[in-house]
Amino acid sequence: MVRVVGVVGAGTMGAGIAQVFACAGFSVRLVDIEQPALVRAQRVVAGSLARFVDKGTLTAADRDATLSRLAMAATLDPLADAEFIVEAIVERLDAKRALFTRLDALAAPAVVLASNTSSLSITSLGAATGRPDKVLGMHFMNPAQLMPLVELVRGQQTSAESMQVATDLCRAIGKTGVEAADYPGFIANRVLMPMLNEAFYAVMEGVGTPEAVDTVMKLGMNHPMGPLALADLIGLDVCLAILEVLQSGLGDPKYRPCPLLRRMVAAGHLGRKTGRGFYVYA
């Protein structure tokens, strides 16, 4: 039975994933090579838990217990005795493959290594290790603390036993795990990103303002958030990276990233995390 979970990467997703596991009673080791990222993650988790307490969905005692189960480190060494590891670093295949090779050498042979990648090949990550049967995708939605879905991605050699471990963990943390095959973008982004990309084109071609496009989708299609506001939340650089994976992996020009998206990313307008995307954030 898994009791100790390692999370690598203390960005938005990594911090959220660590919080989810800690809230569910697991001992969590959150690792990032950048100390400022760990400091920021500590602040983000504490703030998130405080909001749950304010809303009455978490007691102050449970908040304190959750924080006590979350340890942070700037090296991978504390993951040596982790019983399940989730990677949530930058969405680059080369960086993830290099990390999985290191985790493979560090973790006990029975440990399952999961990636929070939103689009990259799980089979390729598994091939960077000596345990491809124990490598899978565990794609949390953003924000991980609130969204109930986790995409569970089976690579070419991922075993049924490893998928069952991940499925059981989803249940333990109150999430619904849905299995997806190892195709670019899996299910979520295979469907979502073309819609977002079409919204980018609509703005670029003057079909409507960002406000108009988002209002149509919210009021006309009953979406809780417009596609452009959602893209700003995800990160425009992340959207671009996923669209490039879809275009390259599937070879279909319909996934070609909108030129406006490329220009915005080149300008550093990445959405909420930089204060400016399709909207301006204080």
Image (cartoon, rainbow, N blue to C red):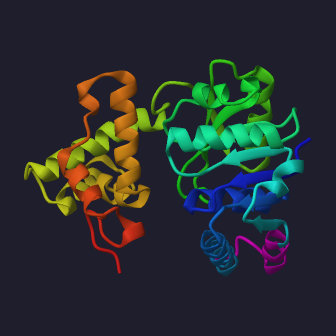
Residue 71: image quadrant is: bottom right
Residue located at (77% from left, 37% from top): 104
Where 147 falls versus 182 (above or below)? below
| Residue 113 in the figure: left or right of residue 81 | left
Residue 29 position, x and y percent, is: 79, 59
Q: Residue pushed farthest left? A: 206
Give whichever of 174, 112 is nearer the camera: 112
Residue located at (80% from left, 69% from top): 66
Give whichever of 46, 136 is nearer the camera: 136
Residue 271, magenta (yes or no)? no
Where 102 falls versus 65 (above or below)? above
* Quadrant housing the N terminus: top right
Secondary structure mostly seen in magenta is helix
Residue 65 position, x and y percent, is: 85, 72
* Quadrant housing the C terminus: bottom left
Q: Is residue 168 visible?
A: no
Tell me the magenta residue range.
55-67
Residue 220 position, x and y percent, is: 25, 49
Residue located at (76% from left, 26% from top): 130
